[in-house]
Amino acid sequence: MTIDVLLKPFNSPKLQLKNRVLMAPMTRQFSPDGVPGPDVVDYYRRRAEGDVGLIITEGTTVGHKAASFDSKIPNFHTPEALAGWKKVVEAVHAAGGKIAPQLWHIGCARKPGTGPFPDYPSATPSGLALPGKPVGEPLSVEEIGEIVQAFAVAARNAKEIGFDAVEIHGAHGYLVDDFLWEGLNQRDDKYGGSRAKRSQFAVEIVQAIRAEVGEDFPIIFRFSQWKQQDYNARLATTPEELLEVLKPISDAGVDIFHCSTRRFWEPEFAGSDLNLAGWTKKLLNKPTITVGSVSLSEEFITTFVGGEAASADITELLNRLEKNEFDLVAVGRALIANPDWVKLIQSGKTDALKTYNKSILAELV
């Protein structure tokens, strides 16, 4: 198996990329007062110069008071922040790259008293931060509508300042995922009670974004089974249940699903080798992105507790891509350690690939 399968162009009606490599979104806190500065411009430009097909930015928060837990996380709603992001877009495009912002609301992951508006209550579907552990009041239907509109406005701004697509962060126990997960969504109105109803918040966000950006602008939706509150949590235990969760979101107007796993090689359901991206593509017949420890030997939590992830062979990844199990590959920590990861892989200089360890975490947070 050669590297060519990873380097061939991706062509869909709404998005054309020079290869199948994406930069995965990775949270950073390098934007004082939420405004990305010259260092952020340089950070993304370096990855575009390294021939990444599409950069998905770190999570950038929408215009709601409870959306962020730290004022150094970039936002996507103030004029100053949007001006900073425009410079990022211009630098990436000048380097021959393409870029999409990840639009984010952290939901119950925000501890009370944190973020730019510390006195504002955190946003949760049912007032829960962990299953059975209340932290506040459930979101009202009125405030849910305000958050939906905040996502839509952010997407419109992304298109206006030149981004090539948008990604909705619907994974990892943040607000959109809080609604998808039965553990935190105990509502009995139109937003809860069944998998399809728990998807309604995501559906409304996608529909509102589509109304703002038009039919030709790509919308990516990132989701996960695991949550930062519970790595063993699952939205679905069978393919049929996964379809119940995702089909309403897909029908609302998602173009590409970003299927977040901690290890891309792990099968999602018993009786099949398909990973989460593979099953999502099979069920929905839409392009999917796989992610999770690509070219590294250990998943990311290991490196936060003193471990080290060494460079690993990608033959299995290439085999799966060749079989059309998924369409695109998001690379995270390896692109932190190696901005030229794509070029090194292409040239066969895999001995030049660095390991990823605690010393490199400074690039992330």
Image (cartoon, rainbow, N blue to C red):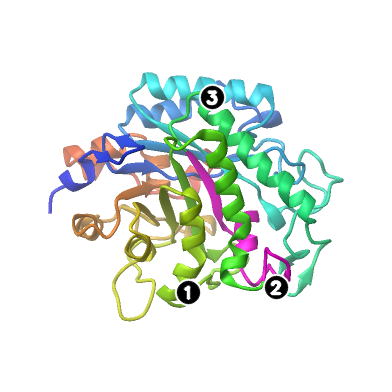
Frontmost residue, 71 versus 165: 165
Relative vertical location of residue 220 with respect to residue 127 in this rendering, above or below: above
Which structural element holds mark 3?
Answer: helix
- Residue occupying the far right of the picture: 119
Q: Secondary structure at mark 2?
A: loop
Residue under label 2, please give it. Answer: 131
Q: Residue at x 81, y 40 (%)?
A: 117
Q: Earlier in the sequence, mark 3 or mark 1?
A: 3
* Up-down relation of residue 206 to residue 248 (above or below): above
Q: In what quadrant of the picture does the N terminus appear?
A: bottom left
User: Residue at label 3?
Assistant: 160
Is residue 154 shown to the viewer in this render?
A: yes
**Horizontal arrangement in the rendering, residue 239 relative to residue 185 (left or right):** left
Task: Identify the magenta region.
Answer: 166-192
Choose top left, top right, bottom left or bottom right for residue 262: bottom left
**Could you tell me which secondary element the residue under label 1 belongs to?**
helix
Q: Position of residue 61 (x, y in %)?
A: 64, 40
- Decide: marks 3, 2 in contact (CB < 8 A)? no
**Closer to viewer: mark 2 or mark 1:** 1
Q: Residues within 10 Å of mark 2 (few under 14, many from 20)?
A: some
User: Residue 74 at what x, y percent from top left?
Assistant: 63, 34
Position of 310 compared to 157: left or right? left
Q: Nearer the viewer, residue 79 or 202?
A: 202
